Image: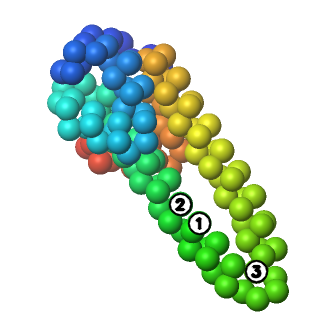
């Protein structure tokens, strides 16, 4: 991935890389910068990616809560299943956190980085090829 040559100010008045990094804050940062930023494609890409990534994180939390409730309802082995699922869920949360940090660092470095699976969806939503 190559650095984005456009490092000018965005319509928010922030440098492009700083706005993109703030837009990486899952869901909230993405929504704010997607609404506010009308010109800079670099920032809009990171904002859309953040919206999709944050939505996936929230859906995982909902699904995880349902799985935990089901496991707790199983007599006998439910507690063991709950324990193992809690470990798996914690590892998945760490993976989400690592991806979020990588995206922010790449944005600050003016590098357009696509989160696996999420980046192509964001590109398609923005109408980019």
Within 10 angstroms of label 3, few (less than 14), some, or many (20 or more) residues? some
Local packing at callout 2 (Cα closer than 10 Å; few below 14, some 14-19, many 20+) is: some
Give the secondary structure at mark 2. Answer: helix
Task: Looking at the image, tell me whether mark 3 or mark 1 is earlier in sequence order.
Answer: 1
Residue displayed at 48% across by 37% down:
114
Residue sitting at the far bottom: 75
Q: Report the disc number at residue 72.
A: none
Q: How is the image coloured?
A: rainbow
50 above or below 68? above
Q: Which element is circle 3 on? A: helix
Which residue bears the numbered disc 3? 78
Find disc 2 in the rendering and name its residue: 61
| 58 to 13, vertically: above or below | below
Q: Secondary structure at mark 1?
A: helix
Q: Are marks 1 and 2 in contact (CB under 8 Å)?
A: yes
Give left or right: position of 114 versus 46.
right
Work out how far the residue at label 2 is from the one at label 3, CA to CA, in angstroms: 19 Å
Name the spot of residue 109 as percent of width and height, x first. 48, 16
Judge by depth and name the residue closer to the eye, 22 or 38: 22
For mark 1, what is the residue? 64
Lower position in the chain sequence, tag 2 or tag 3: 2
Q: Residue at position x 26%, y 43% from top?
A: 127
What percent of the width, then of the height, locates residue 92?
65, 52
């Amino acid at each position: 991935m190559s650095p984005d040559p456009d490092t000018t100010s965005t319509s928010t008045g922030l440098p492009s890389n700083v706005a993109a990094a703030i837009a990486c804050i899952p869901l909230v940062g993405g929504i704010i910068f997607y609404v506010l930023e009308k010109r800079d494609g670099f920032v809009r890409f990171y904002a859309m990616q953040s919206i999709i990534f944050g939505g996936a994180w929230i859906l995982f939390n909902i699904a995880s809560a349902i799985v935990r409730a089901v496991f707790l309802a199983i007599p006998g082995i439910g507690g063991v299943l709950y324990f193992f699922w809690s470990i798996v869920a914690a590892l998945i949360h760490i993976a989400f956190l690592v991806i979020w940090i990588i995206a922010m660092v790449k944005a600050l470095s003016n590098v357009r980085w696509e989160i696996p699976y999420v980046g192509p969806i964001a590109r398609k939503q923005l109408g980019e090829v």
